[in-house]
Image (spheres, rainbow, N blue to C red):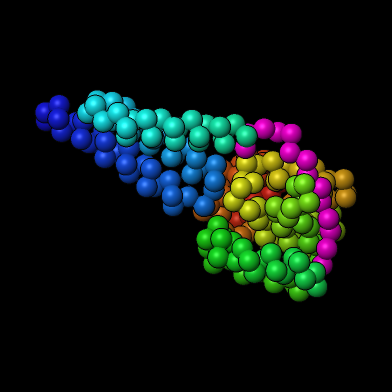
Amino acid sequence: MNTQFLIEAFGYLGSLLVLLSMLMTSVVKLRIINTVGSIIFTIYAFIIRSYPTALMNLCLVLINLHFLWKMSRTDKEYEIIKTDGNDVLLNHLLDYYRNDILKCFPGISYDTKTVDRIYVVLCQGKPVGMTLGNLDGNTLELMLDYSIPEFRDFSIGAYLLSNLKKEGIKKVVYRGPDENHLNYLKRLGFVYTDGAYVKQL
């Protein structure tokens, strides 16, 4: 295995990561993977002395870091409103984001007419999160907990749970698809118990 082969493989790895980042549904993951790929490709471009390519990828790294820093700031101001299945705006949002919802929650089935608790989280007046569920005593059974791509940084989930606690809800249970949300559920303190993810408030 010669040096030239290793250099080329290094370049292909950078290209692969940049391409892979475009498949991410989470903007945060997209930025992180794209940053790693761009760093690798910047180094590769310097090695082969392709300075315009190096400069472009270095700029991409700086742009990604800038937006990751902005997304990591914890001074987002949220507000929450409770609504119902007849809310025209809610149903428009669920329809607008339907493809992304189905990508995030493969195989999910949700119906606003079959739930008795619906919350919409806003940031600066913009709807950024939607939660559907049913209340059984002081336990909320989640059907859907969705955040739009630009706001998938755990802050909406933490805000929502704190507000549910204020409403007297003591436990949240989620039984839906988890393949894209294990990190999210664990980060917010959900524990897998008897076939469901449970969060004690």
Q: Position of residue 145 (x, y in %)?
A: 68, 56
Magenta stretch holds residue 104 = no
Quarter-of-image position of residue 117 = bottom right
Where 35 falls versus 90 (above or below)? above
Residue 96, how many percent across, how many down?
63, 66
Residue shown at 87%/45% (left/top)? 166
Task: Check the picture and name the quadrant holding the N terminus.
Answer: top left
Q: Is residue 159 visible?
A: yes
- Residue at the (20%, 35%) spot, across then down: 8
The stretch of residues the image draws in magenta is 71-84
| Res. 85 in view | no
Q: State left or right for residue 89 relative to residue 30.
A: right
Determine whether 153 is above or below 174 in the image: above
Residue placed at 88% from the left, 50% from the top?
Answer: 167
Nearest the viewer among 42 and 27 is 42
17 lies left or right of 175:
left
Image quarter where the C terminus lies is top right
Image position, residue 103 (x, y; %): 52, 61
Q: Is residue 77 magenta?
A: yes
Write the residue at 76% across / 74% down.
Answer: 113
Of 188 and 154, which appears nearest the observer? 154
Q: Quadrant of residue 136?
A: bottom right
User: Closer to the camera, 47 or 197?
Assistant: 47
In the displayed orientation, state which residue is furthest to the left: 2
